[in-house]
Amino acid sequence: MHQRNFCLAAPLTRVIRHNEVTAEHWYLAPAIANTAQAGQFLHIRVTQTTVPLLRRPISILGADPSSGIVRILFKAVGEGTKLLLSKREGDLVDIAGPLGTPFTLLPDRAPIMIAGGYGISPVLFLARNSSAHTTLIYGARTQSDILLLEENEQVFGQCIFTTNDGTLGETGMVDAPLRRLISQDSERYAIYACGPTPMLRVIAKIAEDNKVPCFVSMESHMACGVGVCGGCIVRTKDGALRTVCKDGPVFDAKIIDFESTK
C-alpha cells in the first residue's frame, strides 16, 4: 500500500545540542508523526534561498502521534546541515516526509539492533515499537561519539557498546559481540542495522554465514528523495539497480551487492 507523505512548514519546538556539531530537533508535524515508521526519513529544506539547492535527508529518530512531535538527530558536516544547526526554537522549517521504505520486525525472531555513529536514530525508533526484548550493539570511535546513552539504556533490554579506543564498553568493532550473540542460537535472532557501509558489509556477511535474517538501512547522498533522479543507486546481487531513497533506505541485506557498494 502506498503511504502518503507530506510537505509542510513545521514549527521547530525544541532544540537539544548534544555537542558542538550535533543537535536534536523536535518538529510539530502531526500529519508526519501519525504515519512515520522506523527507517524512514525527512527531506529538509534548510534555507528559503537556492543555496544550497537540495534538501537534506535525515533519519527520523522518533515520532509521537499523541503529541504530533517528530524528532531527528543530525551532525553538521557541510553547508546545508550547518544551516540547519543554526535554526532556533520557533523557526518554521520546510520538511517533507515520511519518505522511504521502513524496517519491519519479524514477529518470531528476537531483534538484535546494531548502530554505528548516527545510525542510532532508526534503530532506537524501531526499538520503541518492539514489544520483544531488544539488544543493542552500538559502535563508535570513542565514548563521546556514543549518542543518547541514557535513552538507549532506558529503551533497550540490553546494551552492548563498543569503541575503537576502549573508552566505553568493549574495545573494537560491533562484529565481535554480534558473533558472540548469534553463536549461542542463530535461529533465535534477526538483525536490524544502520551505519556506515563498511560496517553493514561486515554485518551482512556474518548474517549470511549464520543464516540469520538481516535488514540494513543504507546511507547515501540523495537529491530528489523520491526515486526519480537516480542519484542514490545501489546494486543488487542480480545486477538490478535500486534507489536508496525510495526502494530503501531499508533493504534485506542478502540482496545487496556490497562489493560494488562504497
Image: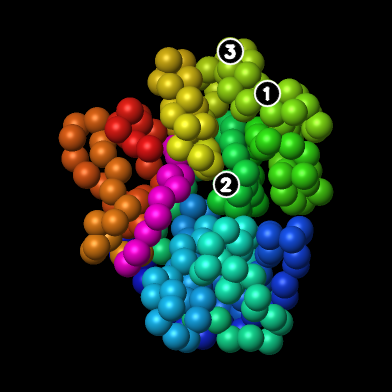
| In the rendered image, the vertical position of residue 75 relative to residue 10, given as above or below | above
Q: Amino acid at mark 2?
A: Gly
Identity of the residue drawn at 48% across and 25% down: 202
Residue 119 badge: 2
| In the rendered image, the vertical position of residue 197 relative to residue 75, given as above or below | above
Secondary element under disc 2, as helix, strand or loop, is helix
Secondary element under disc 1, as helix, strand or loop, is loop
Q: Considering the whole magenta stretch, tell me its main secondary structure.
A: loop
Secondary element under disc 3, as helix, strand or loop, is helix
**Residue corresponding to mark 1:** 172
Left or right: where does residue 26 sit relative to residue 208? right
- Tell me the crowding category of disc 3: few under 14, some 14 to 19, or many 20 or more residues within 10 angstroms, Cα based: few
Q: Which quadrant of the structure image shows residue 164?
A: top right
Is any part of residue 151 visible from this angle? yes
- Which of marks 2 and 1 precedes in the sequence? 2
Q: Which quadrant of the structure image shows residue 98?
A: bottom left
Identity of the residue drawn at 43% across and 15% down: 209
Left or right: where does residue 51 sit relative to residue 159? left
Q: How many marks?
A: 3
Residue 176 lies in the magenta-colored region: no
Identity of the residue drawn at 61% across and 61% down: 76
Whether residues under marks 1 and 2 lie with C-beta atoms below 8 angstroms apart, the answer is no
